[in-house]
Image (cartoon, rainbow, N blue to C red):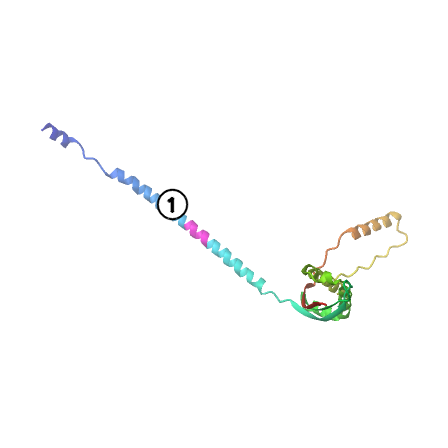
């Protein structure tokens, strides 16, 4: 009987408080996962935007105006003798920046052909047979064609000075002129972009 009375006086154990803690932890976990999902979605959207924007920005570069190709008549020249008399037959096509450059080359074609003819006839067969020799020849042809074109730079007229100028003024002008000559001028952009051989025989 005493045991039954003590058991009756003992209050029942409440199970609610232990269940409250997991609910709070679960809600925090859901909140963290939600924030991470939002951040990842924003990062993905930003990456897609930048990639798509760069792809669209590259399209105009691809659709640039095409270069101009200018064929040059065939050359037949005697080469410098090594093992008997040998000659070179070569035809080429020039790749130029635009139509204006092509027209300029056509206007001075006799000079272009003369320069290239002298260049080719100065070569030995052993210099032209290797690929390295052909590549070097291409560079030299580009220089010769560029040298035939009129320069884009216009020379400025020299200033006239009065005879009454002092010696110091003249010395200062001479020093300035020397310093300007010492400065390396910027090379103009190449108007001849490439040379393509369409016929090349050494015999």
**Residue located farthest toward the front when viewing the structure as drawn:** 83
Viewer can see residue 150? no
Q: Which residue is rendered at x = 33% and y = 41% of the image?
A: 25
Residue 178 x, y percent position in the rendering:
81, 51
Q: Which residue is rendered at x = 52% and y = 58% of the image?
A: 53
User: Is residue 6 depicted above or below 69 in this figure?
Assistant: above
Residue 46 x, y percent position in the rendering:
47, 54
Mark 1 crowd level (few <14, some 14–19, many ≥20, 10 Å Cα): few
Task: Answer with left or right where residue 60 lies relative to residue 77.
Answer: left
User: Is residue 108 depicted above or below 52 in this figure?
Assistant: below
Q: What segment is highlighted magenta in the picture?
A: 38-44
The quarter of the picture where residue 28 lies is top left
**Residue located farthest toward the left when viewing the structure as drawn:** 1
Q: Which of the pair 137/1 is nearer the observer?
A: 137
Quadrant of the snapshot with the N terminus: top left
Residue 120 x, y percent position in the rendering:
75, 65
Residue receiving disc 1? 32
Q: Which of the pair 117/183 is nearer the observer?
A: 117
Task: Answer with left or right where residue 69 lies relative to residue 151.
Answer: left
Residue 125 x, y percent position in the rendering:
74, 63
- Where disc 1 sits, the SS reads helix
Q: Which residue is rendered at x = 50% and y = 56% of the image?
A: 51
The quarter of the picture where residue 88 lies is bottom right
Viewer can see residue 133? yes
The rendered magenta stretch, by its main secondary structure, is classed as helix
Task: Answer with left or right where residue 1 lies relative to residue 174.
Answer: left
Quadrant of the snapshot with the C terminus: bottom right
Residue 25 lies in the magenta-colored region:
no
Q: Which of the pair 35/121 is nearer the observer?
A: 121
């Amino acid at each position: 009987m005493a045991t039954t009375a003590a058991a009756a006086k003992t209050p029942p154990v409440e199970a609610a408080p232990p269940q409250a803690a997991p609910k709070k932890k679960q809600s925090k976990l859901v909140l963290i996962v939600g924030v991470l999902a939002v951040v990842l979605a924003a990062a993905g959207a930003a990456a897609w935007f930048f990639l798509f924007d760069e792809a669209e920005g590259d399209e105009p570069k691809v659709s640039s105006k095409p270069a101009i190709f200018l064929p040059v008549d065939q050359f037949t020249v005697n080469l410098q003798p090594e093992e008997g008399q040998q000659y070179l037959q070569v035809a080429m096509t020039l790749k130029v920046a635009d139509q204006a450059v092509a027209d300029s080359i056509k206007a001075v074609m006799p000079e272009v052909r003369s320069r290239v003819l002298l260049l080719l006839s100065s070569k030995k067969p052993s210099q032209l047979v290797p690929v390295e020799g052909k590549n070097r020849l291409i560079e030299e042809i580009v220089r010769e064609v560029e040298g035939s074109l009129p320069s884009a730079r216009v020379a400025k007229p020299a200033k006239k000075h009065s005879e009454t100028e002092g010696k110091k003024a003249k010395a200062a002008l001479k020093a300035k002129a020397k310093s300007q000559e010492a400065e390396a001028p910027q090379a103009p952009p190449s108007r001849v972009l490439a040379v393509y051989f369409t016929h090349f025989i050494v015999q």
